Amino acid sequence: MLCILMLAVTLLAAVPQALTVVDETGKPIAGASIVSVPGDRIRISAPGYETRIVIVGPDVHTIVLQRALPVIASVRVATGSPQTLHSLPVAASALDRAGIASSTAFTSDALLRVLPGFDRTRSNSMFSNYGLLRVSFAGAGNDRGLVLVDGVPGQDGFGGQVDWAAYPPQDLQRVELLLGAGSALYGAGAAGGVLDLQTLAPPSTQGALPAGDLSFGTGTHGYSQQASSVRAWIAPRLSAAVSLQQQRMQYWDLPPAYQSPIDRIAQSDTSTASLRLRYEAGNRDAFEFGERGAWDDQFEGRPNYTFTRRLAQTDARYTHSTAQAIVQAAVFSRTAFIVNVADQYPLRPGVLRYVQDVPTDEDGVSASWIAAGGPSTFELRADARHIRGETRQFGANNVFQNSGGGSQNLYGFSAQETWRGARYQVVAGARFDTVRSYDQQLVSTANGGQVAQTPPARFDAAVSPRVALRYDLSRTLALRASSGAGFRPPFLNELVRGYFIGAVSYQPNPLLVPERSRTNSAGIDYAGTTTRIAVDLFDTVVNDAIMFRTIDSTHQQRSNVAQTQTDGYTISYTQALGLCARVSAAFTDQYARVSSGPAPIIAKRLQYVPSQSASIAYTAIAGGVQVGATLAYLGQTYADDRNVQPLGASLVAGASVRVPLSGAAEMQIAADNLTGARYLSSIDRYGTPPMVSIGVSLPLGPGNNQQRRLRCRP
């Protein structure tokens, strides 16, 4: 942490010499016009950007123009190459930096409730059992979505959960979501979609002034937040980005059915630190290096009822670019350590039941080649990943109870071709994946001995194809249709680790087999000058679906069921309100159920998949003031396979405002859950209560001062 802080100070020492016009990401703007006007001022303009008038001074080296708030986003995750949402042959959604900055959410998982197609609308990462932090996209179901962060797998390789605390909203620059099976390009895990998170990156424009922020905030429910970020060039070819964040919160999170007389207020403390370096070896070659750490501690309201998470990650990549091709190779290594402490509730609340240590190590490499020529783009991807994890459980006086662990080796290779015509686009591709799993369970016996249970090593393989078509009925109206396959082997956690929630035991199953899915979708997309409307229909079938099955009132076990099916649709709407404001809305209706399997659960809804969800988000920038408002409907969701544990439905509203102060500082006010909705995020946790915070953001670096002056004015 100290090294990162020292580097953040060093970043501010760089001073560029040339006047450069760039966009919000630091990319040079082609065709920008600079004209002198009276009063030692200059007018800067470019198509698609807000015109600015700036006073000429010795500290003005970089001019940052703000785009008119876009109606149609561009994404890379859907096909591997950048395309607008309107021009895609598959369904996707996105959040840009303006939408993220104006969000009222205090955590990244809460931020994503306004992302069309993201099912985990009630996730509560600061106060949740880490095993519940999972994702579902387009109604496919838990664990059937792949999460990437800057191109690196974002889910824990052993358990499958997402450590949202490692990627706070302040660090996120962009979010992209592919809806529907994506294993044809991304492989194992992408059975229902792919979520791509992009974090703060080093500047790409030579000579850009150092820019950053230092912010402090406080609020209700013991909330406090400190954050800092800096982007700068530190040598002629070397740039860097540093991000630091700490957040605390407390509230009574246990619902009546899980309370006891000795309960106290729950508390959560999260911290993250990240460093990214970029070295440009030449016009075509670049090297990147990243370090990320996260620390998360939760006290759930009773003695011996806590969770602790630690994460450390290193990654590096090399990119070679030419006019018609991009070659990239990447490597990453990550360690995680989780401590899960459970008490003997309800019989002896506060008395230790067990302590679980869950260490994980994983490493991966990947390579890709994208070649574009004429109307065709060809892409090859290959990757390999090794995962090693275990769970060790101890009782009172550190007495061993059981352990389980194993390793997985995952390999995959994909090929995809894209053809473009005057009014159409066709994408076809397939991927071959192999997974070899080794696992073992060690159980204590009544006489103090230990018994090892070692199933034979399992080898699984799958071929996942995809074909997609877009056809333009007119310049503004397009049709799309696609069919793609998905593949997900069970996580080691599902094979060997069990745990308790209250009196209910959730058991692993070493005999689980991989899931196979298929998504058929069709949609229509209208894109006008200031309006975009998209309607996408989905049908996803999952064979050998993995889910918790109820054994009796106190036991559930992970099991394969014959088949699940999800039929639904998503409507997305974005409207520009002048140049400096926009409103976005989305509505999803989906019937996600067990279609074949044990009789007691036939036609029952899938766990943690809402029947309906909706959201409205408003973003505006005027004279330096940025305003945001959200309204999200969280539809009925069930926590169990028999649908006897409803989590309820609720309506959550929020608002935020950023007001400029003297010296380029800003005051930030945010409020979330203004409706006072009291809903369950899981059967043993209340969602976040009404929250209000106020803070101050101070600029770091002259580049940030200049950027702050350039705000959208209607």
Image (spheres, rainbow, N blue to C red):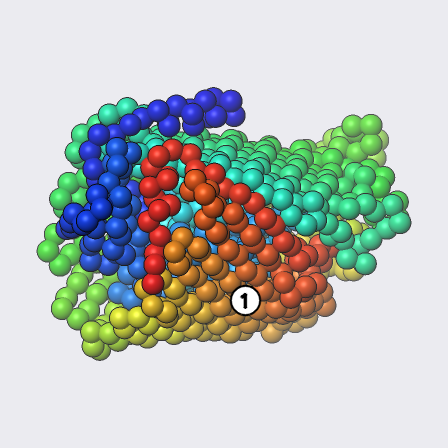
The image quarter containing residue 396 is top right
Would residue 120 be seen by someone viewing this image from the given angle? yes
Check the picture and name the quadrant holding the C terminus: bottom left
Q: Residue at x 70, y 49 (%)?
A: 221
Q: Nearer the viewer, residue 518 or 219?
A: 219
Left or right of residue 336: residue 698: left
Q: Position of residue 691 (x, y in %)?
A: 64, 54
Residue located at (53% from left, 56% from top): 656
> In terms of image quadrants, where is residue 199?
top left
Residue 430 visible here: no
Does residue 268 appear left or right of residue 663 in this picture? right
- Point out residue 106 in the picture as x, y percentages from the top left corner: 57, 50
Q: Is residue 572 left or right of residue 505?
A: left
State the residue position of label 1.
Answer: 631
Residue 7, position in %: x, y?
42, 24
Indicate whether 236 appears above or below 465.
above
How many numbered discs sit on the rendered protein?
1
Secondary element at image label 1: strand
Q: What residue lies at 42% left-to-right and 34% top-to-bottom?
A: 700
Amino acid at pointer 1 = Leu
